[in-house]
């Protein structure tokens, strides 16, 4: 394998001590039958312990063009949903005991718990595949396989990973080392094509021209109506204290609990790299508040709160109209919506591809387990959707030698 000069320079971002092309190529050896003996794994468990590797993960992500994937790790690991699970980080490289010089990839997963006891079911918390696997694009399949091997060898019942892919064809079975070693269960792959982000143009009008007529009309109409009736105006980087923030949440449609609302305030308001914007009516009362993250030319909306007593004015649409215009002025090119209801807007998002790898220890129990899951478990549980979906081809999984 030959690395470009640009790739060689980018390796300095992760602090490698390699000084020659030969040393770098040795660390980033191509996938081969010897790969599993070259790369080793180390599992870090616990939120506090994982956060100690934040700088390393950010450098790795930036090196591989996965910008923003790990920039706000504290926020992701501190979410209410993740606090109910045990968090694990798999480090992969020639010497993962020396993270600054010996790690070339990382996988971040959560383990389901019941009454504080881990169930040995490992899943990504990010269905989009942007924050689970940090690796060079041409090695992601092999890195995912090595991480699955590490988890299965430590007693995992099920291990699932997701990552962004440029291909719509499964690829795990193509690994040269796939059929080596001892059988450890069964696996399946899934390719998902989904709505990713809204591509922002140089002006609001140019952006709206790429959106359907009805959605375009609504973004303009409800904003003009709110301005005429309420004196609505946009406020960036709002100033609000915690008590006011919690009180506003209680007035909103689909209000969340005080614990989650408090977490939103603590993690977003006034925090570097985060933003909280809002719209007010003429008397100074808040109408809608929106929070998210910005990195490079990309912005992500993580949550949005809208007053519940003015549903006829479609405040969520009004907020998005202001927000899109604001971000265009900031030079933003991509807008993701992680939280809030994207409504018809998502129909005009650019399509992206994610690949899922699911490894299950007990192939013979797959059939009975699927019957039980269908009857007892809510369908919206991401990993269980895969177990209950028809049409997946489950194949033998071998642990690498």
Image (tube, rainbow, N blue to C red):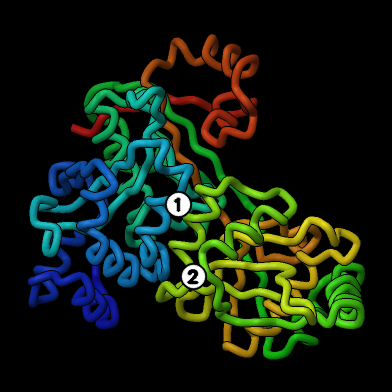
For the question of whether residue 216 can be seen, the reply is no
The quadrant in which residue 90 appears is top left
The residue labelled by disc 1 is: 163
Report the side of 76 relative to 235 (left or right): left
The local secondary structure at tag 2 comes to loop
**Residue 231 seen in the current view:** yes
Dot 2 or dot 1, earlier in sequence: 1
As drawn, the label of residue 173 is none
Question: Residue 377's spot in the image, x, y percent?
Answer: 60, 22
Dot 1 crowding, Cα within 10 Å, few <14, some 14–19, many 20+: many
- Mark 2: few/some/many CA within 10 Å (<14, 14-19, 20+): many
Residue toward you, 288 or 41: 288
In the depicted view, which residue is nearer to us: 172 or 160? 160
Quarter residue 29 falls in = bottom left
Q: Quadrant of the C terminus?
A: top left
Of marks 2 and 1, the one in the foreground: 2
Q: In this picture, is 227 found above or below 305?
A: below
Give the quarter of the image for residue 299: bottom right
Q: Image point 60% across, 82% down: which residue?
A: 236
Q: Position of residue 253 (x, y in %)?
A: 74, 52
**Residue drawn at x 8%, y 71% as measured from the top left:** 17
Tell me the SS state at disc 1.
Answer: strand
Q: Identify the residue shown where x is 23% and y is 64%.
A: 56
What is the CA distance from the residue labelled 2 to the residue labelled 1?
A: 30 Å
Residue 221 located left or right of residue 319: right
Residue with the mark numbered 2: 269
Viewport quadrant of the N terminus: bottom left
Q: Nearer the viewer, residue 252 or 161?
A: 252
Image spot of residue 283 (x, y percent): 78, 79
Question: x and y percent of residue 47 in the render?
Answer: 29, 47
């Amino acid at each position: 394998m030959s690395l470009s000069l640009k790739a060689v320079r980018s390796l300095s971002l992760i602090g490698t001590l390699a000084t020659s092309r030969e040393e770098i190529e040795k660390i980033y050896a191509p996938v081969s039958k010897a790969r599993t003996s070259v790369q080793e794994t180390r599992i870090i468990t616990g939120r506090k312990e994982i956060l100690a590797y934040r700088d390393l993960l950010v450098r790795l992500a930036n090196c591989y063009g996965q910008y923003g994937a790990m920039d706000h790790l504290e926020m992701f690991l501190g979410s209410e949903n993740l606090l109910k699970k045990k968090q694990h980080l798999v480090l992969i490289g020639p010497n993962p005991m020396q993270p600054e010089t010996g790690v070339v990839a990382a996988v971040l997963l959560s383990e389901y718990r019941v009454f504080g006891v881990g169930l040995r079911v490992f899943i990504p918390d990010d269905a989009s595949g942007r924050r689970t696997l940090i690796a060079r694009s041409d090695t992601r399949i092999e890195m995912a396989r090595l991480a699955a091997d590490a988890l299965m060898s430590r007693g995992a019942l099920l291990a699932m990973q997701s990552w962004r892919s440029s291909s719509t064809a499964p690829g795990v079975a193509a690994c040269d080392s796939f059929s080596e070693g001892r059988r450890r269960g069964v696996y399946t792959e899934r390719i998902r094509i989904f709505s990713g982000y809204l591509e922002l143009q140089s002006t609001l009008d140019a952006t709206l021209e790429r959106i359907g007529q009805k959605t375009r009309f609504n973004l303009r109409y409800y904003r003009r109506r709110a301005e005429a009736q309420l004196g609505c105006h946009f406020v960036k980087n709002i100033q609000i204290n915690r008590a006011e923030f919690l009180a506003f949440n209680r007035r909103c449609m689909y209000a969340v609990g005080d614990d989650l609302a408090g977490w939103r305030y603590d993690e977003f308001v006034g925090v570097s790299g985060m933003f909280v914007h809002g719209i007010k009516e003429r008397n100074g009362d808040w109408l809608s508040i929106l929070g998210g993250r910005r990195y490079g030319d990309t912005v992500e909306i993580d949550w949005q709160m809208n007053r519940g007593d003015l549903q006829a004015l479609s405040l969520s649409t009004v907020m998005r109209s202001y927000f899109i215009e604001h971000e265009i002025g900031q030079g933003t090119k991509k807008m993701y919506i992680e939280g809030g209801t994207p409504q018809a807007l998502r129909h005009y998002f650019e399509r992206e591809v994610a690949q899922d790898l699911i490894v299950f220890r007990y192939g013979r129990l797959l059939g009975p387990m699927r019957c039980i899951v269908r009857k007892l478990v809510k369908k919206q549980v991401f990993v269980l959707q895969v177990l209950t979906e028809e049409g997946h081809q489950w194949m033998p999984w071998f642990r690498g030698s």
